Image (cartoon, grey):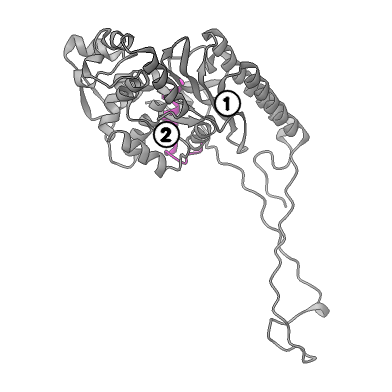
Amino acid sequence: MAGLAHYSGVKPIRYILPLSAALALAACGEAENFQPPAGVASDNGDVAAAVDPVTEEEPAVPLDAQIVAAREELEATLQDIGKDFGGSLGIAVVDVEQDWQAGFNADTVLPQQSVSKTWVALTAMVMAEAGELDLDAPIRVTREDLTLFHQPIRKEILRDGAVITDHADLIERAIQQSDNTANNALLQRVGGPEAIRAMLAEQGLEGIRFGPGEKPMQAAIAGMEWRDAYSYGSTFFDARDQVPDSVRKRAFESYLADPVDGASAAAIAQAFAAIVRGDVLSEEGADTFLTIMANTRSGPRRLKGGREDGWVVSHKTGTGQFWNGMQSGYNDVGVLFAPDSTPYAVAVMIGVTERPTPERMEMMQSVTRAVIAYHEASRSESAADAPGSGDEEEAG
């Protein structure tokens, strides 16, 4: 699979965060001010007392005024976007190179829905790099793997009885097509929900929950228990229509109050920042993973709808069930790459909303436009030349 550079036409770079300035070395004192070590007598017979050494840190170099202004503008814009949209909304933007974050309700835990497919695919790739999984090993996906809702692979399975594929193909189907059955098949073959939770913990990707899997979770949101028959035809929808409104309401509100697949926008954006920096996968693995996400077909009018020429959006969408005119989870998360390869990790998550779909997409596009404006303002020539604002040459 090609790397991100092949997709975007830009040279891949490793996004290593700039190091802080080294501590200043204390200068030697004049000879007449020399003090002997503690406990040792001086020429006049005095014994030096023990004194704790004092270490002085070099004052931090102030940020260029242009960068400060760009940050303040982005923060204000995200606040305006969030307040104008209303409802349960979380937004987080991470400037990966500067290790700086802005957002709106960024720490609020909200439903992920199909965003959670990201962590299944990531687990498979982490395992592959550890030699615990062969991405090219053949896999037989059958009727037992079928789930519900969006599952393009379902037609192939019902037509041929099974689909012979591999882990790499399932990753692409799950991410790019948001195929629930491909994701479920991959989930089972990497070790189930516990394996995903273990990967998140081991990689230090905090603040991200992983639920029991698509089938039991979606059934529970509707106030039902999963049955395999729900994978076929309209069986699930017919059964859901028979659930009393009081039960649907209680189940729906319970899920929103404490989503089993919940995560905050900040946690997700920081997770993507870690992937971009190479903290989770190797350089080649991260490029492959982000390239797969750059070819995502779902949500072309969400974050991707606000991009400008030369920008690449590696992303994953998430969309939940409806009840009584409300939808549980409408998300888009990932990394926005500027034409110069500068990466910005972004997460926009709507917990529940009655706003029409075009308004949701416009809100997400406005976040992308805000990131682009921030990039242009903070990476202009004068800001880029400011001390501490990027790669620094050694003084001398």
Residue name at image x 37 percent, y 26 percent: 1
Main secondary structure found in the magenta portion = helix
Chain part drawn in magenta = 277-295
What percent of the width, then of the height, locates residue 190? 28, 34
Q: Which residue is mark 1?
A: 91
Q: Earlier in the sequence, mark 2 or mark 1?
A: 1
- Residue at 41% x, 15% y is 321
> With respect to residue 40, does 283 lie above or below?
above
Name the spot of residue 36 as percent of width and height, x first.
72, 82
Q: Which of the 4 quarters of the picture holds residue 24?
A: bottom right
Q: Nearer the viewer, residue 176 or 392?
A: 176
Q: Is residue 288 magenta?
A: yes
Q: Which residue is mark 2?
A: 209
Q: How many marks?
A: 2
Q: Position of residue 394 (x, y in %)?
A: 68, 49
- The span from disc 2 to disc 1 (Cα, nearest Å) is 18 Å
Whether residue 106 appears in magenta in the rendering, the answer is no
* In the image, farthest residue toward the right: 32
240 or 78: nearer the eye? 240
Q: Is residue 347 left or right of residue 228?
A: right
Q: Residue at x 39, y 16 (%)?
A: 246
The one of 195 and 94 positioned closer to us in this rendering: 195
